[in-house]
Amino acid sequence: MSLASFENGLNEFSLNLSDLIDIVRRATGKTEIELISLYSEPLIKGNMNPATGGVYRLRGELIEDDKIDEWSLILKISAPNVNYSDPTHYNYWRRESLVYSSGLLSQIPQIYKVPECYSIDEKNDSSTWLWIEDLIKKDKKGSWSYDQHIIVARYVGIFNGAYLTHSYSLPDEEFICRNFMKSWISECDRFERKQFNGSLFEYQEKLNDISLKLGKRYEDFCDNKEKLLQKLELLPRVFAHQDIWSKNIHLRNDGRLHIFDWQFASISGIGEEVGRMVGYAISTQLYNPDSIETIIEKIFLSYLQGLHETGWNGDPRLARFGFLTSASFRLLTVVSKLIRKKEEEKVGNLLAAHTLLKMSAEAIKLKNVIFY
């Protein structure tokens, strides 16, 4: 690689060479090194979290004692955003850097492996740069299989169960979100009011035009939404990652879940996190329509198995309620897509909506039984 190309790489990120060398030393454990190449690639293309200024892989070659070796790092930029400046907001822009700097992630159940953070740099533009261990080395392709969703659910159950059995204490840091679903739902509602000029009546009318039955069932869900949310916050509490999906998780054969991106770190209810994972999968039509109910049930039972492996022997209906309620809240995005998308895209969204409405109906029944 030419000197000019190397300098272009530094200039692209306004990097100081000595600072980069220092971070690479920490990442590689090598001391007397010279960097001989530098390449960068964006890891997020298209839609990006508005509190994120970019995620990149920086890699290259180094030389030490006349031996050439490779190095790589992940650079995640947290961008200040006035809409996400409140620490109680689910998308608080500084949360991940604070999670790392606090040392909190060194005190969590070892079923999760978290990448090491080598440096946190506060920039003049108020952004925060996190230099993180590259555990994957290259992009993963595609979504999880059904079996992988089932495996991940068990890991999440083991992680959550460690807090339910008091093997680990819940974090008490102020920057940890404590009302994730409430904050997320508030953001969804704000978006819909903006789209329909504040007229929820117009929103409901458009849904009725698609399917009167669907419109009525969605209206029933909306009538129970606040009560479901209130009861969700009464569930036994666990520490949660709250963004469990294939881009943030790496399944390895070491008996641990390699997990990235702690922007949404929260204190949440039992079942809530894995329900959110399933709700997202349903909303993006990742499951086979012919076996969707079987897949959902297997995932929940796998989560329950993980809880039991930690010694938790509480009421499984509590986990079920958290699972169903959290998943059904994805209706807020599915119905929005159903109204806006083209005619040929409606079939998948209709199936997703009906599946989530069925889950919400069961959640409402459970609410009336558990929280009488």
Image (cartoon, rainbow, N blue to C red):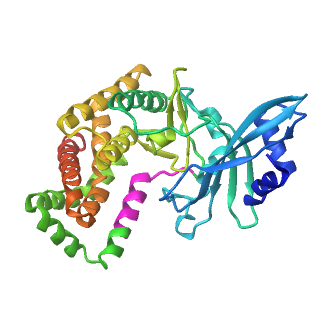
Q: Position of residue 233 (x, y in %)?
A: 37, 48
Q: Mostly what secondary structure, the magenta segment? A: helix
Q: Residue furthest front?
A: 2
Q: Residue furthest bottom?
A: 197
Q: Position of residue 212 (x, y in %)?
A: 8, 62
Q: Does the image show residue 59?
A: yes
Please give the name of the residue rendered at 34% of the width and 26% of the height, measured from the top-left corner: 302
Q: Position of residue 106 (x, y in %)?
A: 65, 34
Question: Is 61 above or below relative to 124?
Answer: above
Please give the name of the residue rendered at 31% of the width and 79% of the height, measured from the top-left corner: 197
Left or right, 370 with respect to 123, comes to left
Left or right, 314 with respect to 75, comes to left
Q: Is residue 187 magenta?
A: yes
Please give the name of the residue rendered at 73% of the width and 59% of the height, measured from the top-left corner: 12
The part of the image, by quadrant, that contains residue 202 is bottom left
Q: Does the image show residue 29?
A: no
Q: Position of residue 213 (x, y in %)?
A: 8, 58
The part of the image, by quadrant, that contains residue 27 is top right
State which quarter of the image contains the N terminus: top right
Q: Is residue 341 magenta?
A: no
Question: In the rendered structure, which segment of residues is drawn in magenta?
Answer: 176-190
